[in-house]
Structures are given as C-alpha cells and as structure tokens.
Image (cartoon, rainbow, N blue to C red):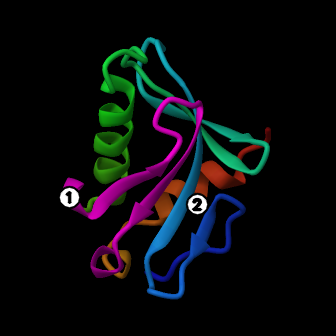
Amino acid sequence: MSVPDLPFLRIEKTGSVIVDVHVMPNALKTLVQGLHDGALRVRLKAPPVDGKANQELVAWLARELKVPRASIELIRGDTARRKQLRVAQVSVANARWERLHTAGQEAD
C-alpha cells in the first residue's frame, strides 16, 4: 500500500517516512486517540522513565504497521511528548499504513 496523505506522515527524499507523534504516557493501555496539533496522538501504557515510553512507542508502531522493530527509529523528542519516528525505506512499501489512516480520520 502506498503512504496515505495524512498530516502526521511525511515522505523523505530517501523514501523513508517520518511519523509525527504526540505521546501521553502512563495510560491504562497503548492506543491512538486521534490527532493533536497535526501529530498522531498516542496514549502509552509505559511510564516516561528510563526510555520505557520511547521503547513502547517504537514497539507499538512496529506492531501497528507490521514491520520489523529495527526499521523504526526515534529521531527527535527523546525526552519530549512530541516525537518524530523514521520508518526505513525498505519497510515503507510493506507497511500497513491503513491502520494509521483510520486514526487520522478521527476528530481531534
């Protein structure tokens, strides 16, 4: 599937995709809660301690897109709520973008 035109997705010249995310740690479970200021709002079950929330975010995105964890990299926002993740070009064509596409359709 091709990459949908959503406000939180950006295709780089290399073919990789940047995903803008706004995280809310310490939730009861990890799930998408719509959009926040042009970013995908994700509630994370993990606490924001020792990088656990970042690890949970990468693992969650890999599960949602059905791509290897190694193809997702946190590139910005290590200690911030607003984060950017890169999905490697080799996994972009096989990623299940429709799972995020549904979240992007939700109201703020």
Q: In this view, does 64 lie above or below 34?
A: below
Q: In this view, does 3 lie above or below 34?
A: below
Query: Residue 98: x and y, percent?
Result: 49, 64
Residue 102, numbered circle? none
Q: In which quarter of the image is residue 89?
A: bottom left
Comparing 33 with 68, the one in front is 68
Identify the magenta region: 68-91
Query: Residue 81: x and y, percent?
Result: 59, 31
Q: Which of marks 1 and 2 is in front?
A: 1
Which residue sits at x=39%, y=38%? 57
SS of the residue at dot 2? Answer: helix
Residue at numbered disc 1:
70
Residue at numbered disc 2:
101
Query: Residue 7: x and y, percent?
Result: 72, 62
93 with respect to 41 (left or right): left
Which residue sits at x=67%, y=74%? 5
Cα distance between the residues tagged 1 and 2: 22 Å
Q: Which amino acid does label 2 sit on?
A: His
Which image quadrant: the N terminus?
Answer: bottom left
Q: What residue type is labelled 1?
A: Ala
